[in-house]
Amino acid sequence: MPYGYMGRILRINLTSGEVTEQQMDDGLARAYIGGSGLGARMLYDETSASTDPLGPENVLIFMTGPLTGTKVPTSGRHAVVAKSPLTGIWGESDAGGSWGVALKSAGYDGLIITGQSPRPAYVWIHDQGVEIRDATGFWGQDTYGVDAHLKSVTDPKASVACIGPAGERLARIAAIMHDGKHARAAGRTGLGAVMGAKNLKAVVVCGSQAPAIAGPEALQASIKRLAPLIREKTTNYHKYGTGGGVVTNAVLADMPVKNWRIGEWVDSAEKISGQTMAETILTGRYYCKSCIIGCGRVVKVSEGPYAGVDGAGPEYEALAGLGSMCMVDDLEAIALANELCNRYGIDTIETGTCIAFAMEAYERRIITQSDTGGIALNWGDPEALIQMVHAIGRGEGIGQLLRHGVRAAAESLGGLTLEFAIHVKGMALPYHDPRALSSLAAAYATYPRGGCHRGMSHGLERYAIPELGYDEPMDRHATVGKGVMTAIAQDYYGLYNSLKLCHFIAGAIAPSDIVTWLNLVTGWDMTLEEFLRVGERASNLKRMYNLCCGLSRKDDVLPPRITTEKFDEGGSKNYLPHLGDMLAEYYKHRGWSKDGVPLPATLIALGLEQEVADLPLGYREVSVQK
């Protein structure tokens, strides 16, 4: 068994009920490391442009990394990969909590699920074996109830990944939820619908095994040295969660307001901030496995119209999506809306964007109360917010229109709505504005799963990483250099998703520290250069997957509102990002054509020789741009 890995990947065919194991390939492990990087290799090899994301032929991949299950801080994470039903392209999500560690404790580095169960089912993975069990009796239950029930019939120490009613109904914004009330979500790209299409309600895991560590004493010494620095640099995450950045982001006009239309909302932002949460409804903090930060919020609302909230509190994206995007500044109402999203199993980012989109359509009289089932979709109305979450979660009324995402809703309504449906490649933007942090323009346009900030280019606009060539943060409104910086950041932070590590430690430790941890766990002698090359390889493979699905430069665009509408007020007044210049720089740095196609020499240099044959005609013999 290799150090850092369990050496086995579990495969389950739900159609036949066949359960098999495959050995971890040592060469692939070093070439892709794990998590979403290794998941990219598997998805590329096992699906194609013709694969129906909701068909039995789609593969659902749960993948840990070599650091998962170790004492490395923030390594208790896992990736989920499939062809996305929301976008039709590369689908990837990421979650913390305990599930990834539990899968590894059961003896597996990853899980690949194919086929479709003939009836509702759940999978129970433990030291003694793997079982496919009937889930008919609790099909329809919300995620909190399912988590509690499955622990009662398997093991109280088990970890549960499950879908709620939205995933069962194949809502394309459905999430895969973990850890019950603590609600760690693999929220993006609609992978909950992939589970629903497979008639798979949950995957429950529990075990007692642990990966072997090549250099346990040296690893412990390194962790002991760096842990105090991580705690120091992440103090605000512990105190206030990700919501601690709400006011700062509002001051910069980074947090979108009124469907990305307003640049000034600071007074209201203070009412829904992590600081206000800590003073009012916060009752505790939640730590993912191996975490020393504790950013998870545990909240409770005991009185008033939103009494009954008891579980995971809203994080930044939920505070923005269910708050500022809809102009709702009632923190308790947002907490309830967030809990409902968790229970139904829907992504808070997609949900917030869909509701804000509907509110704007209502304001413009494109839809009326006869379309909304009587809901008056007025900006800032907390009751409308709650009713809309119910409608989307149940797929009822106007929720039927919105449950497949904002692109699908705009395509259905047509006309002007296409102008204010804020998404890239079908995935709603997360709640950081390229008009405040310009690199996000290139990051959103080029990220393989659609509008996404997990490439963390904006991190290099806020802190320095000298080993990546950035001795100080870049000017947040600069253009020159942002394309290159975006590519470097996507490759580097993509490695966090392969290892699996939390991005929150990125401003505290150096890339070389991470490589040291990787080598001490695995026994490798990987250099920083080779490490970064692994990230570049995964980025190019994901790009190739999307090209095979029909995407190209024409899809590397932003919503018109982001590139043409300046703010009249706030911290980013009168600024628009120059996406075209950034894209040209980004493509050239990557060794791609001006159309955004990886060139043969680029692929060959990355060890992707076989993928050259998948390039569009006319590119297979082109040399790399200088």
Image: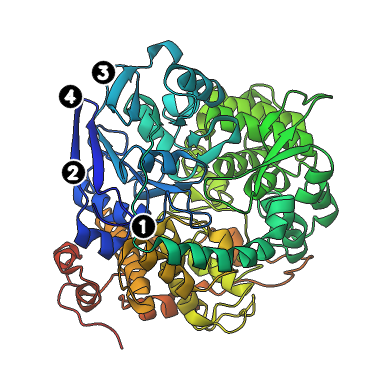
Earlier in the chain: of badge 2 and badge 4, it is 4
Earlier in the chain: of badge 3 and badge 4, it is 4
Q: CA distance from mark 3 to mark 1?
A: 41 Å
User: Residue 174, labelled with which disc?
Assistant: none
Assess whether mark 3 and mark 2 are in contact (beta carbons under 8 angstroms): no
Earlier in the chain: of badge 2 and badge 3, it is 2
Q: Amino acid at mark 4?
A: Ser
User: Residue 213, labelled with which disc?
Assistant: 1
Q: CA distance from mark 2 to mark 4?
A: 18 Å
* Horizontal relation, residue 484 to residue 458: left or right: left
Q: 10 Å neighbourhood of mark 2: few (<14), some, or many (≥20)? A: few
Q: Amino acid at mark 2?
A: Gln
Assess whether mark 4 and mark 2 are in contact (beta carbons under 8 angstroms): no
Q: 10 Å neighbourhood of mark 4: few (<14), some, or many (≥20)? A: few
Q: Amino acid at mark 3?
A: Pro
Which residue in the protein does label 2 denote?
22
Spot occupied by residue 119 in the image (x, y as percentages of width and height): 30, 16
Q: CA distance from mark 3 to mark 4?
A: 9 Å
Q: CA distance from mark 1 to mark 4?
A: 37 Å
Determine whether the residue tagged by mark 1 lies in a helix, strand or loop.
loop
Render colour scheme? rainbow
104, above or below 583, in the image: above
Q: Kindly give the residue lying farthest to the bottom in the view shown.
A: 626
51, above or below 563, in the image: above
Which residue in the protein does label 4 denote?
16
Q: 10 Å neighbourhood of mark 3: few (<14), some, or many (≥20)? A: few
Spot occupied by residue 573 in the image (x, y as percentages of width and height): 74, 70
Which residue in the protein does label 3 denote?
118
Q: Amino acid at mark 1?
A: Ile
Quadrant of the image containing the C terminus: bottom left
